[in-house]
Image: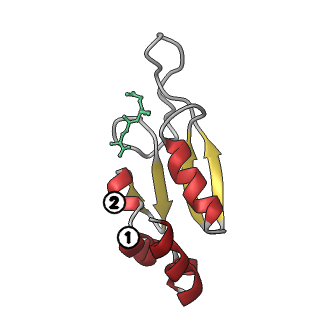
Amino acid sequence: MLKFYHAALSRSGRVLWLLRELAIPFELLRTEIPRRDGSGSRDPRNPQPEGKVHALEQDGEVVTETGAIMTPEALKLTCAPVADGTRYDSLRRAI
Ligand SMILES: N[C@@H](CCC(=O)N[C@@H](CS)C(=O)NCC(=O)O)C(=O)O
């Protein structure tokens, strides 16, 4: 199962939205990140090399860049459900 590392009130919300919009099955792992106001801290469970969000993990492969995740082609490769034609077509229309 796809694992998605997400921190509230961060840019990982945009990938969270996309995964939900496309009804892609995933496990949501809420994580902490260091915040500009000094709150928060790095979560050692988060596989993002800099401790940032977001991170999408599947079969040991980790993808972290928005641009590498939010393209129809990338999602077709990393998310098996998108490979079924209907979701791929709706994703192409959405992005
Ligand atoms: N390159 C990432 C940006 C990652 C990023 O800067 N994330 C911020 C949250 S919006 C973060 O985790 N900041 C915590 C930190 O800098 O340690 C992307 O593709 O969106």
30 or 84, nearer to the observer: 84
- Residue drawn where x is 46% and y is 45% of the image: 54
The disc at residue 62 is none
Q: Position of residue 42 (x, y in %)?
A: 47, 27
- Tally of marks: 2
- Does the closest atom of ligand 1 sit within 8 Å of the Cβ of label 2? yes
Residue at image location 47% in from the left, 10% down from the top: 38
Amino acid at circle 1 = Ala
Q: Using the image, tell me which numbered label, if any, was put on residue 74.
A: 1
Q: Is residue 73 left or right of residue 84?
A: left
Q: How many other residues sit within 10 Å of disc 1, few (<14), some (14-19) or many (≥20)?
A: some
Location of the N terminus (image quadrant): bottom right
Residue 51 falls in which quadrant of the image? top left
Name the residue at 52% across, 41% down: 45
Which residue is most to the top? 38
Amino acid type, mark 2:
Ala
> Element under label 1?
helix
Q: Is residue 69 above or below residue 76?
A: above
Residue 68 - label? 2
Q: Secondary structure at mark 2?
A: helix
In the rendering, at what x and y percent does residue 31 appear? 58, 36
Q: Are marks 1 and 2 in contact (CB under 8 Å)?
A: yes
Quick one: 21 or 60, which is closer to the camera?
21
- State the quadrant of the C terminus: bottom left
Q: Which is more N-terminal, label 2 or label 1?
A: 2
**Residue 68, horizontal then vertical, whole percent:** 33, 60
Q: CA distance from mark 1 to mark 2?
A: 6 Å
Q: What's the residue at 48%, 56% (across, down)?
A: 56
Q: State whether residue 39 is above or below residue 23.
A: above
Q: Is residue 66 above or below residue 61?
A: above
